[in-house]
Image: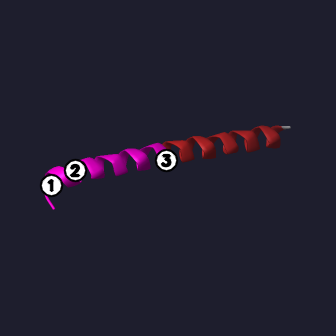
Amino acid sequence: MTEVSTLPVIQNILIIYGCGAAVLLIFIFFCYALRKTDWKR
């Protein structure tokens, strides 16, 4: 196991987790906005 072969894997994992976290945050924010508009009505 050399660092050269493990670095791309770590970068890919970070990118995947980053995208997943971004989508999750957008989804939570969207649901929160919908709930706020429902409460106002």
Mark 2 and mark 3 lie on one chain; the one further toward the N terminus is: 2
**Real-space Cα distance between discs 2 and 3?**
20 Å
Q: Which residue is mark 3?
A: 20
Identify the magenta region.
1-20
Does 41 appear above or below 9?
above
Q: Are marks 2 and 3 in contact (CB under 8 Å)?
A: no
Relative placement, left or right, of 8 versus 4 is right
Q: Are marks 1 and 2 in contact (CB under 8 Å)?
A: yes
User: Dot 3 surroundings within 10 Å: few (below 14), some, or many (20 or more)?
Assistant: few
Between 31 and 11, the one lying in front of the other is: 11
Identified at 75% across, 44% down, the residue is 35
Between 32 and 6, the one lying in front of the other is: 6
Task: Quadrant for the C terminus, please.
Answer: top right
Q: Residue 36's spot in the image, x, y percent?
A: 74, 41
User: Dot 1 surroundings within 10 Å: few (below 14), some, or many (20 or more)?
Assistant: few
Relative placement, left or right, of 24 versus 9 is right
Q: Which residue is mark 2?
A: 7
Q: Residue extending furthest right? A: 41
Specify the amino acid type for callout 2. Leu
Specify the amino acid type for callout 3. Gly
Relative placement, left or right, of 27 versus 12 is right
Between label 1 and label 3, give the one nearer the viewer. Answer: 1
